[in-house]
Amino acid sequence: MNGLLNDPQYLGLRLAGFLVIMAILAAPSLPLISAISQGIAKSQKKSFYDKFGKQFTRMCLIYGGTALAVLTLGFARYLTIDPVMLQGPYQLPLILSTGVTILAVIVLTVYFKAWKTMRKQKGAHILLGLLSSVLLFAAVLCVAMVANVLQSLEYFLPSMGTPLEILTALISAASSKAFITYMSLGIITGFALCGTFGQMYLLARRDKDDFGRDYYKFAMPYAAKWAIGGTILQIAASIVMLVSTQLPILIEQITSSAPKDLLQNPIVMTWGFALLLPVFACILWTFIVLSATPMRRKVSVYCAGIIMIVTDISLLFAAYVGIMMTVAQPVVS
């Protein structure tokens, strides 16, 4: 099983899977942003924030549902190659992950469907949105914990263990510094992508959800501000990740290699993309925020979206390699 997931011939499949992973990582933050926007709408008496929150929740159902469907198909395909996951100790974690995911989807759906019926109970409705966000975070964490054990060469679930022993082993594997670091970075990148996806969603739904020119003049810059804030946080997290993993190696390779060789160096290129490209995305979003006609800046929206997708694929790949290199270092006792 581990050999399958770490086989170099599946590198392209893993890279493609990053697209699905990014959508899944972004899903928990979307209802959180919706609930925050509802809170602003309630305190400032501005309905545009409430409409924006509803659109973001719908986007979460669409994007998250699509990503979940693709993940399910990929998992089904994986089972045809290696059906061991349906046997022994993997049954319990899979049941728990599935249960939490279904519960999260149900609560999120109720949150969206109750938008009109709970109009006079905004406080309770906001709490429902926050609950859906928490459950989505829990679902993503459960799935990540199972995936962590599957790809790990160090941690295994006891084949003949009790349910308590299996859960203990699962939590023990998730308590590793490598898992916590990578998962934290993933959640941050997901949060940064919310505003990115949101802008593209606003453009895609402009004709179907016609809330008027004034609303979109508000909504597009508002989504861009979320994208800028999340991306700044992501850049900071990327720098911390680089310093704690591959900075000495990166400096050595930059100083000892010819400029033309650097373009063929995967470590230099991935970290270069991860740290420099989001700056250009933030510049494009700043133009959108300052624009009098933000909905006309379609090129900026889509270019920034493509930039962030390339950025996050590079970042998640570079961080994974960096963490694995750190873990693989010999320990002197």
Image (tube, helix red, strand yellow):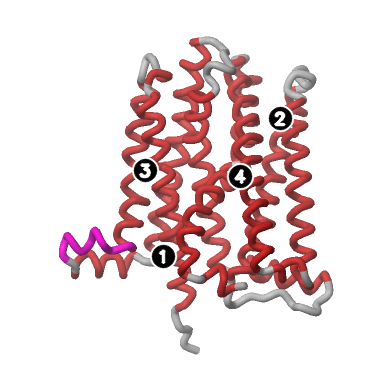
Residue 271 lies left or right of residue 251; in this view the side is right
**Type of residue at label 4?**
Ala
In the rendered view, would you say 184 is above or below 153? above
The residues tagged by marks 2 and 4 sit, at their Cα atoms, a distance apart of: 25 Å
* Residue extending furthest toward the right: 162
Please state the horizontal and vertical placement of residue 262, each as a whole percent of the image: 23, 61
Upstream in sequence: badge 4 or badge 1: 4
Location of mark 3 (residue): 278
**Where does residue 308 sit, x and y in percent of width and height?**
41, 42
Which percent across, then down, holds residue 9?
47, 67
- Label 1: state its secondary structure: helix
Q: CA distance from mark 1 to mark 3?
A: 20 Å
Q: Residue at x 16, y 65 (%)?
A: 258
Query: In the rendered image, is residue 258 in sight?
Result: yes
On screen, residue 144 above or below 192: below
Q: Is residue 92 left or right of residue 19?
A: right
